Amino acid sequence: IPNWGIAIILLTLLVRVIVLPLNISTFRSTRKMQAIQPKITAIRERYKDDPQTLNKEMMNVWKENKINPFGGCLPMLLQLPVFFALYQVLGQSIELYQAPFVGWIHDLSQKDPFYVLPVLMAVAMFFQQKLTPTASMDPAQAKMMQFVPLVFALMMINLPAGLTLYIFINTLSGIILQQLTNVKKTT
């Protein structure tokens, strides 16, 4: 592939396809979590002063409904090695030095000079976050999660544009997958 930016996009999509079964499982688990949300809310209210019993009761509800509240972490954890490998390659590969992508990005191993990709990435992450149900989350935790796109954008400002491209395309493909899952759920 003559363009390294296109190669990064294809790699991102390949990784997404590989973890697709896990992502689908995560979406199903999220739907189950939404369905039991009234029970979880009642348990939180009933045992708000007894954290040990609260945790025990929540675990029982999750077990009864065959829900793993941490199941959503697996696809992300599987993608971390790719992220770190890409970071190393972009920072040290001679082939990527001054490798242009499109328009304003003349070097994928350097930061985006106009910060377009970090901003697009943050907007995409914010949109994806709005699509993702937060039913099982504590309200304070849900409020904090609203700042994740901004924090990621600030972290990516000085990192290689190729890495930001990877995360942006990964987020876009996640949005598309989420939309397809939501459409399938309603039909």
Image (spheres, rainbow, N blue to C red):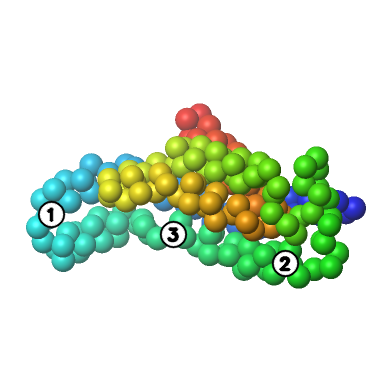
Q: Vertically, is 57 above or below 172?
A: below
Task: Provide the residue designation for mark 1.
Answer: 48
10 Å crowding of disc 3: few (<14), some (14-19), many (20+): some
Question: Sequence-wise, which precedes: disc 1 or disc 2?
Answer: 1
Secondary structure of the residue carrying tag 2 is helix
In this figure, which residue is indicated by the disc labeled 3? 71
Residues at marks 3 and 2 touching, judged by CB atoms closer than 8 Å: no
* Lower position in the chain sequence, tag 3 or tag 1: 1
Q: Which amino acid lies under the numbered mark 2 shown in the image of this protein?
A: Gly
Of badges 3 and 1, the one in the foreground is 1
What is the distance, in whole Å, between disc 1 and disc 2 at their CAs? 48 Å
Residue, disc 2: 91
Q: Position of residue 166 (x, y in %)?
A: 67, 53
Please identify the residue farthest to the top as the structure is shown: 187
Left or right of 141: which side holds 107? right
Element under label 1?
loop
Q: Is residue 46 left or right of residue 8?
A: left
Q: CA distance from mark 3 to mark 2?
A: 32 Å
